[in-house]
Image: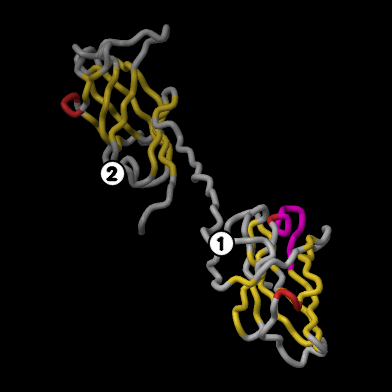
């Protein structure tokens, strides 16, 4: 097969060769008067007749249906009607017959696939963007980390009615420990390392230590007011999940 042609395109030329009827030699000096028949065969569809017109002198001459350019060596380029390459057939090729005095033969064309894109400018492929999701960092009273992370987390503190709790005048402490029998502290974050923010002063931000995310596990956390009898203002779980990381 030859190079593809975009179905429905215009001003196409199809290549063919002129051969003697015994296929022994090429016909290299074909003229318009020699051509007896010329059609574009469309696979699975009706043929399109090409009415021979004139010889082109240059392969870049303006397209005129039925014009033929002698490319040399028995090879010819035939300017075909647009209907020849219309959609509705998987491929096309030109075929014809010629007679010159006592000689006769055939015009046998390359087969051109008809495609739905312009192969000369490339096939545009749309690649869908990757889609991924990550667990919410703070989901209810659960704070989520991934192994190896040392990142700041922000937690909004509300009471049982959903109202913001003003933390601005409190001496805060965040304790992260193990839920196992020993209840060993993993990290204790003092008030000076906790930032209070938000319009209602009910948001705290703090950064975990590497010890917290050293391994995948579930820990506990609590926010306390150390100036008021270590009152627990909020508490929940710390979940550390495995994720790909450099060795």
* Residues in magenta, as a range: 83-93
In the image, residue 179 sits, relative to residue 30, either above or below, namely above
| Helix, strand or loop for disc 2 | loop
Q: Relative to the observer, which residue lies in front, 55 or 7?
A: 55
Q: Name the residue under label 1.
A: 62
Tell me the distance, in whole angstroms, between the alpha carbons under discs 1 and 2: 74 Å
Find residue 167 and report its horizontal and vertical position in percent: 25, 14
In the image, residue 116 sits, relative to residue 182, either above or below, namely below
Could you tell me which quadrant the N terminus lies in?
A: bottom right
Find residue 184 and report its horizontal and vertical position in percent: 32, 36
Q: In this view, does 26 lie to the left or right of 199?
A: right
| Residue 24, quarter of the rendered image | bottom right
Q: Is residue 112 left or right of residue 46?
A: left
Find residue 68 and report its horizontal and vertical position in percent: 65, 71
Q: How many marks?
A: 2
**Per the image, is 80 magenta?**
no
Question: What residue do we see at 50% from left, 42% from top?
Answer: 131
Q: Relative to the observer, which residue lies in front, 178 or 6?
A: 6
Q: Mark 2 points at which residue?
A: 210
Q: In this view, does 25 lie to the left or right of 232?
A: right
């Amino acid at each position: 097969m030859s190079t593809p042609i975009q179905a429905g395109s215009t001003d196409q030329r199809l290549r063919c060769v002129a051969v003697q009827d015994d296929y022994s030699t090429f016909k290299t000096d074909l003229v318009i008067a020699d051509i007896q028949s010329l059609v574009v065969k469309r696979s699975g569809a009706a043929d399109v007749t090409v009415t021979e017109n004139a010889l082109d002198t240059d392969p870049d001459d303006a397209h005129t249906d039925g014009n033929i350019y002698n490319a040399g060596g028995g090879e010819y380029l035939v300017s075909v009607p647009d209907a020849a390459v219309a959609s509705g057939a998987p491929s096309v090729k030109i075929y014809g017959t010629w007679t010159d005095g006592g000689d006769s033969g055939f015009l046998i064309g390359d087969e051109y696939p008809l495609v739905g894109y312009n192969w000369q400018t490339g096939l545009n492929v749309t690649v869908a963007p990757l889609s991924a999701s990550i667990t919410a960092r703070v989901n209810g009273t659960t704070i989520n980390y991934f192994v190896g992370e040392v990142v700041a987390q922000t937690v909004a503190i509300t009471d049982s009615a959903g109202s913001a709790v003003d933390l601005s005048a409190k001496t805060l402490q965040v304790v992260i420990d193990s839920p196992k029998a020993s209840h060993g502290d993993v990290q204790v974050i003092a008030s000076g390392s906790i930032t209070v923010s938000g319009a209602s002063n009910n948001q705290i931000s703090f950064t975990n230590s590497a010890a917290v995310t050293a391994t995948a596990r579930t820990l506990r956390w609590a926010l306390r007011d150390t100036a008021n009898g270590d009152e627990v203002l909020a508490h929940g779980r710390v979940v550390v999940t495995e994720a790909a990381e450099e060795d």
